[in-house]
Image: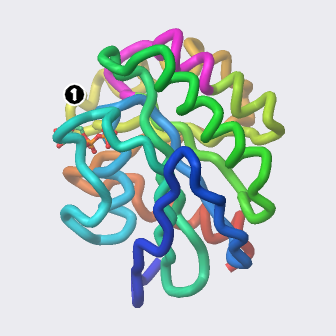
Amino acid sequence: MIIRSLELETVCGITSTLPENTLPEIAFAGKSNVGKSSLINGLMNRKSFARTSATPGKTQTINFYNINQELYLVDLPGYGYAKVSEQEKKKWGQMIERYLHQSKQLRAVFLLIDIRHAPSANDKMMYDWILSQGYHPIIIATKLDKLKRSQVQKQIKVVRQGLGLSKDSILIPFSAVTKQGRDEIWDLAEEICGL
Ligand code: GDP
């Protein structure tokens, strides 16, 4: 994907009305600090356009990035931040649920998992939840550069088994440092959006 134009078009908080977009949407979910901002910045060829986690979990918004007037990358708020109150967690859940339910343009949900660790209970819950909302999450295993090459296949297995992925589920390893996986993610996103 060649980025010709890029705009943070909509930022939705808990009480905002969700936009009724006409372009296809691709959403990204993952726990705080998994590398979601870095991935979105990497996809957009920017260093720090998407928020970074100076205060992880603080920004409970859904951000819509319009790419080339062709599609939206949708940055869902990160989960699993320990210092967030129960009430805020509930609001967070409602906000994501509302988006997954209401968006008429959502074509796919990418779920980010740190390749170095077995998926957490929250990761597993998020995976099952996305499934139950009728989407088949595509897994992005982040921070690939932090592993030795010899560990990669083993860790992919750990992530796959931890989430209970079926054989035909897609998992793409990605590094925001080397950009490995970027083209694969874009190719898939474009295919899904019919571009
Ligand atoms: P977010 O909270 O999910 O948006 O996570 P960020 O993108 O802000 O990343 C959290 C931390 O992990 C930051 O210090 C990033 O620099 C680092 N990070 C993110 N992706 C990668 C990666 O692919 N490789 C390495 N080495 N560090 C990464």
Q: Position of residue 50 (x, y in %)?
A: 31, 59
Q: Is residue 5 left or right of residue 20?
A: left
Counting other residues with Cα less than 10 Å from the Cα at mark 1, is it few (<14), some (14-19), or many (20 or more)?
A: few
Where ligand 1 lies, by image quadrant?
Answer: top left
Residue type at numbered disc 1: Lys
At 40% from the left and 17% from the top, the residue drawn is 85
In this view, the residue in front, 139 or 150, is 139
Q: Quadrant of the C terminus?
A: bottom right
The residue at the far bottom in this view is 4
Residue 189 in picture, x, y percent from top left: 60, 63
Q: Quadrant of residue 51?
A: bottom left
Left or right: 67, with 194 as reference point = left
Q: Would you place residue 118 above or below residue 93 in this image? A: above
Residue on which the image places disc 1:
148
The verdict on label 1 being within 8 Å of ligand 1 is no
Residue 111, position as x, y percentages in the image: 54, 38
Q: Residue at (27%, 66%) from the top-left corner?
A: 49
* Residue 157 appears in the figure: no
